[in-house]
Image: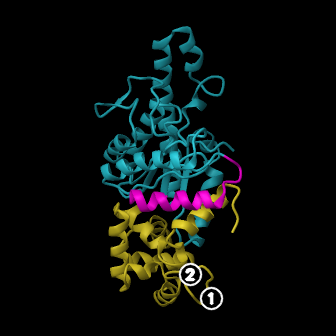
Chain colours: A cyan, B yellow
Amino acid sequence: MDYSFKPAKAIVHEDTPIMEQAQLLMVAPVFYGAMPNLGLYTQPDGPVPNPADLLPKGRIKEARAAYEEAIEHAVKDIVYVASAFYEAGADGIDFDTVGASGDPDFKAALLATEILRKKYPDICIEMGMAGEFVLGMHGEITHDGVRLAGLYPHDQVKIAQKAGVTIFGPAITTATNKSIPWTLSRAITFTKACVEAAEIPVHADMGMGVGALPVCETPPPDVVSMVSKAMVELTRLDGL
Amino acid sequence: MGDGDPAGVAITHAMASGMGGMRTSGDLVARMQMTRGMKIAEAKRYVANKLGVSVAELTDAAVMWEIRQNLGLGVVYSKRGLPKGMEAKHHIAQLLGIEINSLNRFRQRAG
């Protein structure tokens, strides 16, 4: 199944008993996670006109309206699924790859966070990003007066913690045409600035292709261990 | 130890920079970040203080094995009679003074 809130909604009643069983057995915290993934709300996969079709035709206003409508659908699905899993006992909810569809995607995650924080004051929400730069697919979307397009991790975390995020995950995309030391230096520069700006714990995204991990099926353990250690020692972050 | 897929990456991370999870006190420190929003240094100090150990001992598997057994906090390879699952989480919540979502719901429903 696609790792996104929209398809997760259809099988939430089958999945929540598994969370209940897991919570009975597990001692370590167990989260539920999925992507906002606004792309799934556009035609032909969803109900909203596809901005990727509209933008090349210069229909910018309609494309923006489509994104705004997709945000509404996504927020409803995220809140529905996250509520179901939290009420099934989940220790937290992970919004993964936030901003994959640009600023509307980030906006949907922030709105859902605010609703969930109000609904469940003690809920733990982890927000992991899709990249170091929020793409301006809409371009004019704001949150609390801040334009989301173009935000880097040290600004992303400020708006996330204000919305009610508990743990923030900056994602720095690996540059595949550069050496590991080069891309590691870049990842550390962004992450260190994010940690310094954050009032909440920071857990850097360090899977394949982000956080200076190479993009290959078998990442060499020497590279992964060096990158892992360097990120902890040099940025003083709170987790991975 | 293997590498080669996302699970392999996780293992390498755990070996390179992890606290040791339930073999030590990683899950307890994580819970302080999750429930109180503590940064890692504060979370480690808090847990060490509650356990009566130094921060360095939090990642000592030999020390923590004994402490976790004595306090009923759950261990990876649990022996007969030791707390598991919800029972261990009950002790963790009491020790750390935190709310655990699944535990609270279990208590409500069990009456």
Residue, disc 2: B75
- A10 horizontally vs B97: left or right: right
- The crowd level at tag 1 (other Cα within 10 Å; few <14, some 14-19, many 20+) is few
Specify start and end residues of the magenta stretch as a single range. A216-240
Residue A50 visible in the shown view: no
Q: How many marks?
A: 2
The part of the image, by quadrant, that contains residue A159 is top left
Q: Which chain is mark 1 on?
A: B
Disc on res. A193 = none
**Cα distance, mark 2 to mark 1?**
8 Å
- The crowd level at tag 2 (other Cα within 10 Å; few <14, some 14-19, many 20+) is many
Give the percent coordinates (x, y) of residue A28: 53, 70
A104, above or below A53, in the image: below
Magenta highlight on residue A42: no
A213, above or below A152, in the image: below
Disc 1 marks a residue whose amino acid type is Lys
Q: What predominant SS class does the magenta segment belong to?
A: helix
A138, above or below B85, in the image: above
Q: Quadrant of the N terminus of chain A?
A: top right
Residue, disc 1: B79
SS at mark 1 in the image: loop
